[in-house]
Amino acid sequence: VEKLWEYAPCSTSGCPGYGSGNHLSSVAMSDDGKYLVIASYNYKKVYLFSTDSSEPLWTYDTEDVVYSVDISADGSSIVVGEDDYVHLFGIDSNVPIWSTEDSSSSGLSTQGVKISADGNYIVSTGGFLYSGGLSLHLFSIDSSTPLWNYTLDCCSSGSNPHFTDISISSNGS
């Protein structure tokens, strides 16, 4: 395996989160291998790269930690699972096409996101920090309002449930 390039956004003690567990929380690549999206946990940033260059095409600063990112098969849509939000981006702009409303008042922590290969559906998962339940949400690419929600009452109140490893069929059915 040959290393093509390296990008280190933060390698000195002056960087936010340096030396305090800063790490990449999620990485996704388009099916054609042209685009790479990366989330930095403590640095609270999302990076979009073309695999041809070690310079980001764009970056996005988040308000909170990012647990998960995904990119559609053709690389045209990017979904970001920030702690209290789900964001949808197009490949050409670091301005979200849409974002869900702030869910922090409900205690919901968004932990996983996935986009269908055809780019038409997004699924997000999360945990309710106060009630101990887990949640699942299905979105159409066209709206930040979920098509449906499901809550799994699985855990004791006060626990910190996690539901991060998710999949969706290629066409969302």
Image: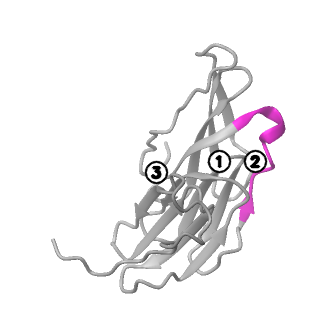
Which numbered disc, 3 or 1, marks the residue that appears first in the sequence?
1
In this figure, which residue is indicated by the disc labeled 3? 171
Residue closest to the far right: 105
- The quadrant holding residue 33 is bottom left
Q: Residue at x 46, y 77 (%)?
A: 49
Residue in view at x 49 percent, y 42 percent = 173
Q: Are marks 1 and 2 in contact (CB under 8 Å)?
A: yes
> Circle 1 sits on which residue?
139
What span is in magenta? 98-108
Determine the secondary structure under disc 1. strand
Question: From this viewpoint, which residue is outermost toward the front?
Answer: 13
Percent across and percent down for residue 95 are 71, 73
Residue 54 lies in quadrant? bottom left
Give the image location of residue 125, x and y in percent. Answer: 58, 38
Q: Is residue 93 above or below residue 98?
A: below
Q: Nearer the viewer, residue 22 or 158?
A: 22
Q: Residues within 10 Å of mark 3 (few under 14, many from 20)?
A: few
Label number found at residue 145: 2
